[in-house]
Image (tube, helix red, strand yellow):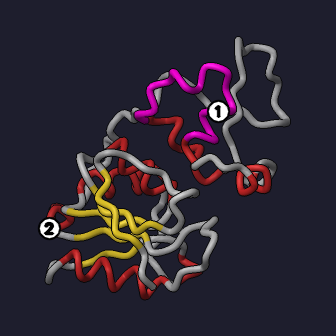
């Protein structure tokens, strides 16, 4: 998705290409995008998200699945180190979840600390200027609460731990450093 192409500024081992661009200068092109073309196939598959995505490659089962990002050079506000950053919405949840329910979990996790909710301005939330800014905030917040796969993946590359509210075990990104809360709403 174009919204995430800024991530390629934070890695040195790959870069995005667009369908309309010339692809002749590449040794290999790897397309791991599920949405929208592979979404129905993924939903029909018995595989979880990570196994499905890495199964798109012949060598996928042997790939180290730890995402590596160079830390963004962006400096965040010092008070962020005491805040809980919450991402209460996503693009592709199977079950639509009310952001206020996710925010309630974030406030419980925060235990009195400030909570900053981020997402799309269309949902009435703070929207980051770029993916690099979002990554810097994920890196620097005292705690992070996610419900969406993409923000959970970013947290895995930038943090030692974070809280993830499970939307659907099949569609969730799982990671050993993730503290999972099963959704009860």
Residue in the image at 20% along x and 70% along y? 83
106, above or below 153, in the image: below
The residue closer to the viewer here, 161 or 51, is 51
Residue in the image at 32% along x and 48% along y? 74
The residue closer to the viewer here, 177 or 75, is 177
Q: Circle 2 sits in a helix, a strand or a loop, which is it?
A: helix
What residue does disc 2 label? 82
Task: Return the x and y of residue 99 as percentages of the image width and height.
Answer: 47, 83
- Left or right: residue 66 compared with residue 55: left
117, above or below 185, in the image: above
Please provide the residue range marked out in magenta.
51-67
Disc number for residue 55:
1
Task: Return the x and y of residue 30 as percentages of the image width and height.
Answer: 69, 27
Q: Residues within 10 Å of mark 2 (few under 14, many from 20)?
A: some
Q: Residues within 10 Å of mark 1 (few under 14, many from 20)?
A: some
Task: Return the x and y of residue 129 as percentages of the image width and height.
Answer: 48, 60
> Does the stretch in magenta take in 60?
yes
- Left or right: residue 45 compared with residue 137: right
44, above or below 54, in the image: below
Q: Circle 1 sits in a helix, a strand or a loop, which is it?
A: helix
Residue in the image at 53% along x and 36% along y? 8
């Amino acid at each position: 998705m174009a919204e995430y192409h800024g991530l390629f500024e934070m890695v040195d081992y790959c870069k995005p290409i667009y369908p309309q661009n010339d692809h002749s200068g590449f040794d290999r092109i790897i397309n791991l995008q599920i949405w929208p073309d592979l979404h129905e196939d993924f939903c029909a598959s018995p595989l979880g998200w990570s196994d499905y995505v890495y199964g798109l490659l012949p060598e996928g089962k042997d790939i180290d699945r730890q995402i590596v990002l160079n830390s963004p050079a962006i400096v965040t506000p010092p008070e962020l180190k005491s805040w809980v950053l919450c991402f209460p919405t996503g693009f592709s949840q199977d079950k639509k979840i009310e952001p206020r329910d996710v925010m309630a979990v974030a406030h419980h996790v925060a235990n009195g600390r400030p909570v900053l909710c981020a997402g799309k301005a269309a949902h009435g939330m703070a929207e980051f200027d770029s993916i690099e800014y979002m990554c810097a905030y994920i890196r620097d917040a005292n705690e992070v609460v996610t419900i969406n796969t993409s923000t959970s993946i970013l947290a895995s590359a930038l943090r030692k731990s974070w809280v993830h509210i499970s939307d659907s075990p099949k569609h969730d990104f799982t990671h050993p450093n993730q503290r999972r809360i099963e959704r009860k709403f």
